[in-house]
Image (spheres, rainbow, N blue to C red):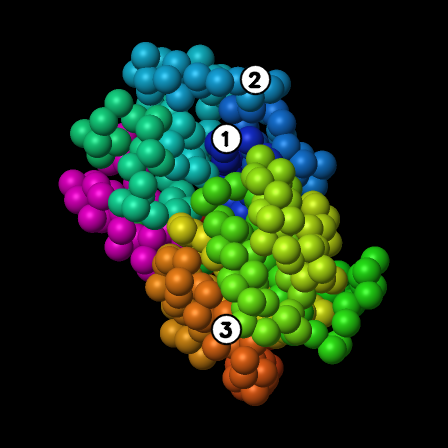
Amino acid sequence: MVLHSKKKILIFHFDMQGGGAEKVLINLLQHLDYSKYDITLHTIFGAGVNMKDIPQEVHVKYVFKKIFRGFSSLMKLLPPKFWHWLFIKDKYDLEIAYLESSPTRIISGGNKKTKKIAWVHTTLSKDKKILKAFRNDKEATMCYNKFERIVFVSNNTLKEFCKCLPNVKSEKIVIHNVNDYDRIYKKAIEPCPLAISPERINIIAIGRLIKLKRFDRIIQAISQLKKEGISNIHFYLLGKGNEQENLSQLIKNKDVVDQVSMLGFDNNPYKWIAKMDLFVCSSEREGYSTATSEAVALGIPVLTTKVSGMDEILKNGKYGLIVENNDNDVYHGLKTLVSNPRLISKYKKTISQQPKPTTQSLIENYENLFDNI
């Protein structure tokens, strides 16, 4: 009897903070078949709330204990080959750069004989700052061409990448993010620490409190609706980040303290989502919104700006309203929905008639990729 050795895989990432990519990575790691794979998760920085959720089968390494300013500038001083030699000491059958920028640049400098995959979680052409880890577009193209495959989380992410870096010739595929649906459904039935009034239209948004997420758009819209006499709304904002103080001040300035609750970070956002009438994504940019896909899985209609992945998640508008990516359209979209509860109910009914998604079908896509490259 011949014993086949496990495939040795390196997953190289930035850190394990509370962002969408990190959450999806945890979902992936928690569902892989460890009888087939020997997985090492190697991060540049050892920080992050998601560290505690990494399965015990995974070998965990990091380069620096804490994040420091100027890292991206430091990386550009020397070529990728040097940083790969400095950071990656072991040999692997497959090396995966799980994030754009620094992880991709570093992994591109590895041994030519080692198979490589790069992951792209967001749109590149909308904001060239995402490519700031590379010296220029020419170097970015050179680095991406070192990978056998590039995986995109949505069709639009792939499309925008090709516009931004048209000379990248590596094979490109789309694989949607992994959600832990069994856990989502189980956690959703837990009670909330606050009473949710059925007399109001309850709205939720989830994510890091950073400018890119544009949660201020929702607060502004609720303030405007209040001035117009539409006040039967309560907005719950779940997350933490460096915009927390600014958002808190905006809530006070706009006189919507009684209509907006900032909940902070919660390990179980699903108990909140499941009790809502509407989920809102107000972002300027997304790759494939994990929180939005989770809301749909729990049967909650969505109002979203037109960002990558939403056509796929909302089935081209069957599960919610997709509006243009500006403040005015977010306001008008919210007004349309809260003024017409029947429309919200219609979206909810449509979602409920679809088969519930499963985690295993998504995991098979990842394992097929790992096995066949």
Task: Locate residue 131 relative to residue 22 in the image: left or right.
Answer: left
Which one is in front in this view, the residue at disc 3 or the one at disc 1?
Answer: 3
Give 216 or 343, whichever is nearer the viewer: 216
Give 194 or 94, whichever is nearer the viewer: 194
Relative to 37, is 84 above or below? Answer: above
Q: What SS does tag 1 mark?
A: loop
Span shown in magenta: 142-170
Give 300 or 97, whichever is nearer the viewer: 300
Precedes in sequence: disc 2 or disc 3: 2
Residue corresponding to mark 1: 14
Residue 81 lies, in percent from the top left, at 33, 18
The picture quadrant where one finds residue 1 is top right
Relative to 339, is 283 above or below? Answer: above
Residue corresponding to mark 3: 335
Mark carried by residue 64: 2
Q: Hey, what amino acid is under mark 1?
A: Phe
Residue 248 lies, in percent from the top left, at 64, 45
Residue 166 located within the stretch drawn in magenta: yes
Estimate how packed mark 2 is, as few (under 14), some (14 to 19) or many (20 or more) residues with alpha carbons within 10 Å: few
Which corner quadrant holds the C terminus?
A: top left
Residue appearing at x 44%, y 70% in the figure: 332
Precedes in sequence: disc 2 or disc 1: 1
Residue appearing at x 74%, y 78% in the figure: 199
Mark 3–mark 1 Cα distance, whole angstroms, equals 39 Å
Residue appearing at x 42%, y 30% in the figure: 103
Mark 2–mark 1 CB contact (< 8 Å): no
Q: What SS does tag 2 mark?
A: strand
Mark 2–mark 3 Cα distance, whole angstroms, equals 47 Å
